[in-house]
Image (cartoon, grey):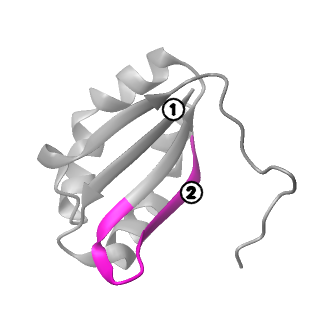
Amino acid sequence: MLVVTTIELSKGFQAWKDMVHSVQDKMKEHGMTFVFAGTERDDDTKLHTVIHFESEEHLITFSEDEDLTRLRALAGAVVETGTFTPITDAAFINYPRVLDLD
């Protein structure tokens, strides 16, 4: 399942990105993969992501993981105000070709 999120970052994108790279085991445990993550061009505190969760149960375990929530907050994520919007299973990505943003 795909989920679109928005969240405010009090410490900017790099601190949050470093945290994400440090919790790969947690991401695997919660069956999650970032399809996209980035901040607005003119505002490094406005994060938008698209996350793929292997199942709704994985999304629930992610949302209930107090340790991961603490780590996200320490990295500057204002978790109390973030939004998570599940997307229909009819969605598609990488059409008509896979993009390489590097």
Q: Which sits earlier in the primary sequence, circle 2 or circle 1?
A: 1
Quadrant occupied by the C terminus? bottom right
Circle 1: residue type:
Glu
Crowdedness near tag 2: few (<14), some (14–19) or many (≥20) residues, C-alpha within 10 Å: few
Number of marks in the rendered image: 2
Q: Which residue was labeled with disc 1?
A: 29
Q: Position of residue 29 (x, y in %)?
A: 51, 32
Mark 2 lies on a secondary structure that is strand
Mark 1 lies on a secondary structure that is helix
Q: In the picture, residue 42 is in which quadrant?
A: bottom left
User: Which of the pair 58/28 is nearer the observer?
Assistant: 58
Residue 43 belongs to magenta span: yes
Say left or right for 78 vs 45: left
User: Which of the pair 89/1 is nearer the observer?
Assistant: 89
Q: Position of residue 98 (x, y in %)?
A: 83, 58
Say left or right for 81 vs 77: left
Residue at 21% x, 66% y is 76
Crowdedness near tag 1: few (<14), some (14–19) or many (≥20) residues, C-alpha within 10 Å: few
- Residue range of the region highlighted in magenta in the rendering: 33-47
Residue 12 belongs to magenta span: no
Q: Position of residue 20 (x, y in %)?
A: 44, 59
Residue at 81% x, 49% y is 95
| Helix, strand or loop: magenta stretch | strand
2 vs 1, front mark: 2
Q: Which residue was labeled with disc 2?
A: 36
Q: CA distance from mark 2 to mark 1?
A: 19 Å
Q: Is residue 35 above or below residue 26?
A: below
Which residue sits furthest top?
Answer: 57
Q: In the picture, residue 59 is in which quadrant?
A: top left
Residue at 52% x, 43% y is 51
